[in-house]
Amino acid sequence: MIKHHLQIKPVRRPRDRRPKLLEIVKQRPTFIVELDPPRDLQFEKIIAGARELKACGADAITMADSSLGITRMSNMALGHLVQDRTGLLPILHMSCRDRNLIGIQAELMGMYALGINYVLAITGDPAKFGDQPGATSVYDLNSFNLVRMIKQMNRGVSFSGRAMGQGTHFTVGVAFNPNVARIETQVRRLRKKLKYGADFVMTQPIYRPEQAKELARVAREFDIPFFVGIMPLVSARNAEFLHNEVPGIEIPGKVRERMRKFEGEKAREEGIRIAHEIEQEVLAYFNGIYLITPFKRHEMCVQLIELARPVAKLNYS
């Protein structure tokens, strides 16, 4: 009996030739835009929105992981489609809520296989706040240990210490909430995340222009890029809901009062004006802008990118 010995070579992914996001942000204003995966099966509008955002100058798309415990399409599947069809860089939020240690590592391995290398590591909102009665939260890990595990996988080692044959290439982002009474608590958490290997920061949306300067003081301690969150408001009701119901968001009374003066399209225009005022202040201190799309209205983020161009030229020419 003749045995045929086949030499099997490991499959290597094509090298990603795109400029690295964290190199781009050192040189010029850089825009990450969040698009929420759909709650149904209609994803083509997301792809179309991503194309428009790329055309106007967005540098990356980020996608939440069923935020607030509300079931949405897999961000890994949708992120792959966006990358494949538009060329935009996907940054995927990864929550510790829905997957145990096995599932999280499997998801990361799948992302690596698809060429998705940017992750925002978060603990995640509890399932009890979502739309699935009886759903449970896992939390085998928290955001600190998730960062540490991903960096360990970059060295070619699984959480249990098993050799993986080769390392992954993940760039890891972490969240920062400036909307707290004592920001030093958040600073301590951020120090710990950096100790475990975080590469960049994405903040919760801010609604006071002076917060940009406060964040700049925080950022001086850390030698990594900050992408400051800005989310345009669409109505007075939207402003009140975010302020009262969404953890980590605080909207000043003056801003909510401005929104109460308008309805419909006029309210959305006022939301853009408020967001652009904040955007101008942020660009005086940071290159990184993180635009959060409200209610699938990606055109509002398109407007904010276009409005930022003259400000960016003034500050960085």
Image: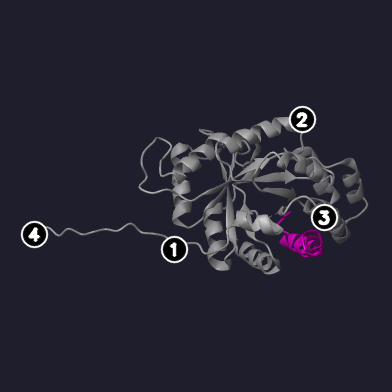
- Residue at mark 1: 14
Asked if residue 291 lies in the magenta stretch, the reply is no
**Residue that carries the numbered disc 3 in the rendered image:** 280
Task: Tell me the residue at 69%/65% (across/down).
Answer: 57
> x, y (%) of residue 135?
56, 37
Quarter of the image containing the N terminus? bottom left
Quadrant that contains the C terminus: bottom right
Q: Earlier in the sequence, mark 3 or mark 1?
A: 1
Would residue 41 be found to the left or right of residue 280 on screen? left
Would you say 158 lies left or right of 5 here?
right
Circle 2 sits on which residue? 182
Q: Residue at x 71, y 61 (%)?
A: 298
Upstream in sequence: badge 4 or badge 2: 4
- The CA distance from mark 2 to mark 1 is 46 Å
Vertical position of residue 144 compared to residue 83: above or below: above
Count of numbered circles on the image: 4
Q: Amino acid at mark 2?
A: Arg
Vertically, is 281 above or below 56? above
Report the span colored magenta.
292-317
In what element is the residue under mark 1? loop
Q: Secondary structure at mark 3?
A: helix
Q: Amino acid at mark 1?
A: Pro
Q: Could you say which disc has been placed on residue 181 in the image?
A: none
Dominant secondary-structure state across the stretch colored magenta: helix
Is the Cβ of the residue at disc 3 closer than 8 Å to that at disc 1?
no
Residue type at mark 3 is Gln
> Which residue in the protein does label 4 denote?
2
Q: Earlier in the sequence, mark 2 or mark 1?
A: 1
